[in-house]
Image (spheres, rainbow, N blue to C red):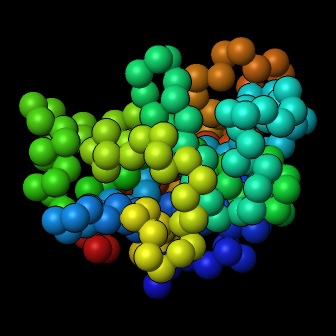
Amino acid sequence: MILLRDFYRQPVQTVARALLGKRLVRRFDDGKAVGIILEAEAYDGEQDLACHARNGKTKRNAVMYGEAGHAYVYFTYGMHWMLNCVSGQDGYPAAVLIRAIYPLEGLEIIRRNRKGIQKLHWCDGPAKLTKALSIDGTFNGIDLCASNSLLFIEEGIRIPDEHILETTRIGIHYAPEPWRSKPWRYLVDDVELLVEAI
C-alpha cells in the first residue's frame, strides 16, 4: 500500500524515523526496483540552519514549500543527485533525505546501474541509491502519493525501536550549533535482523 499524504504531513522527525523499514519503489519500463529504507535524515524549516530553506524560498528549494508527499531532488557537489521527501504541513519547508536502502527487488536493474560496484555498496549512501534507481532532476516535484507515479514509498516491515539509532546528521559542517548536533539522523542498526524479517 502506497503511503498516503497524511503520513508525510507529520512532523519531519516523525516522518524520518517512520520511513525506516518502508519500501522505496522505482518503476521502470522493464520492471521495478525496490529497496527497504535503512537511513534517513530530517531537515526542519527555515530555522534549521542545516536545511536548504535556511535562506528562504529559492528556485532550487521551491518544492520544499509545496505540498507534503512530493519528492525534492537536488544536485550537489556538481555530480550527485539526492532524494528527499517533502514533509510536515503544506507550505512549511521541511524534508527527509533518504540516505540508504537495502536492495530487495529488481536486482538486475540495480546491478546494471551500479556496474562494477560490489552489491554491499550499491545503495549505502544517498548518491549511490539515486544512481542505483536512476533518479535525477526530472523527479524533482514528483508526487510520491500517486498510484501511477514512477517513484513512491509503500508499507514495508516494522523496525523495533531498540534497533533504531538516532545520531547527528552527516556532512553539515557549515551549520552552527545547535543545528549541527541535532540527533535527526535515523538508521537501522542491525541489517541482518531486517533481512531475516523480510
Quarter occupied by the C terminus: bottom left
* Nearest to the observer: residue 196 or residue 40: 40
Image-quadrant location for residue 10: bottom right
152 relative position to 103: left or right: right
Frontmost residue, 193 versus 4:
4
* Residue 119 percent coordinates (x, y): 16, 43
| Residue 77, placed above or below residue 26 | above
Can residue 166 be seen here? Answer: no
Measured along the vertical axis of the image, is residue 114 above or below residue 180?
below
Is 168 displayed left or right of 198 in the figure? right
- Image location (x, y in percent) of residue 45: 83, 43
Please give the name of the residue rendered at 43% of the width and 28% of the height, measured from the top-left corner.
80
Q: Is 36 on the left or on the right of 74, as rendered? A: left
Residue at the image point whose x is 13% and y is 46% from the top: 111
Q: Could you tell me residue 104's position as x and y percent?
A: 24, 63
Please report the residue visible at 67 percent of the width from the left and 74 percent of the height from the top: 5
- Look at 74% across and 62% down and name the residue there: 67
Q: Is residue 76 left or right of residue 193?
A: right
> In the picture shown, does residue 20 fall above or below 189?
below
The quarter holding residue 51 reads top right
